[in-house]
Amino acid sequence: MKKKIATVWLAGCSGCHMSLLDMDERILDVLAVADIVKSPIVDGKKLPEVDVTVVEGAVGADEHIEEIKHIRKQSKVLVSLGDCAINGNISAMRNFYTVQDALERSYADSDTNDAPQIPGCEDILTLDKKVVPLHDIVKVDYYIPGCPPTGDMIFYVLNEILNDRVPDLQKEGGLKNG
Ligand code: SF4
């Protein structure tokens, strides 16, 4: 029976998902043993129970905390994809400022918009004071470092996990938890 995998994008720039596509034709090897049931690159929107979830981006909002806890509950294996997921990286640069500073810089300090304004709270995520890596909130099984990680590294880790092998991440330049 085919395995199920999901990929999720939290506080990241989508660059890690672009690298995922850099697996190129090797994505067919992945699809030979697994179905992608939820991802920004497929239609599935709900996360069923899955064998592997690969998560790009850090945790920077109340909604992210709820989502990563749900992902952990639904996933046998959880993989932190990229430096934002692993240590906050670019997403955590706003930790030097207040949430209000970040909102004003993002929405109100505009040279091109005649009437810049910060959107209402119903229109944007509820930002937390600090952006944190995934493992601050849930247990993470594997880490794939890089900004972004290479398509080669992503394929290596996915292929090993999906074929019931333990990725030798030290050898491949990654990090294994525990
Ligand atoms: S690790 Fe780099 S490429 Fe990936 S989401 Fe963060 S900033 Fe973007």
Image (cartoon, rainbow, N blue to C red):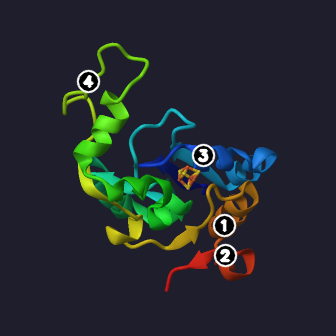
**Mark 2 packing: few (<14 Cα in 10 Å), some, or many (20+)?**
some
- Residue position for label 2: 167
Q: Give the residue type that dot 2 points to.
A: Pro
**Mark 3 packing: few (<14 Cα in 10 Å), some, or many (20+)?**
some
- Residue position for label 4: 117
> Gap in Å between the C-alphas at discs 3 and 1?
18 Å
**Mark 1 packing: few (<14 Cα in 10 Å), some, or many (20+)?**
many
Q: In this view, does 113 lie above or below 66?
A: above
Residue 162, by quadrant, is: bottom right
Single out the mark in the foreground, 4 or 3: 4
In this rendering, the count of numbered labels is 4
- Residue position for label 3: 15
Who is closer to the viewer here, 13 or 175?
A: 13
Does the residue at mark 3 contact the one at mark 1 (Cβ under 8 Å)? Answer: no
Residue 58: % across, % down: 42, 57
Q: Is mark 3 within 8 Å of ligand 1?
A: yes
Q: Give the residue type that dot 1 points to.
A: Val
Taking the view exactly as shown, the residue that stands out farthest to the front is 111
Q: Is mark 3 on a helix, strand or loop?
A: helix
Mark linked to residue 157: 1
> Gap in Å between the C-alphas at discs 4 and 3?
28 Å
Q: In this view, does 48 lie above or below 155?
A: above
Single out the mark in the foreground, 4 or 1: 4
Does the residue at mark 2 contact the one at mark 1 (Cβ under 8 Å)? Answer: yes
Q: Is residue 26 left or right of residue 59?
A: right
**Split into 4 quadrants, where in the image is the N terminus?**
bottom right
> Gap in Å between the C-alphas at discs 4 and 2?
47 Å
Single out the mark in the foreground, 3 or 1: 3
| Mark closer to the chain start, 4 or 1 | 4
Q: In this view, does 35 lie above or below 145?
A: above
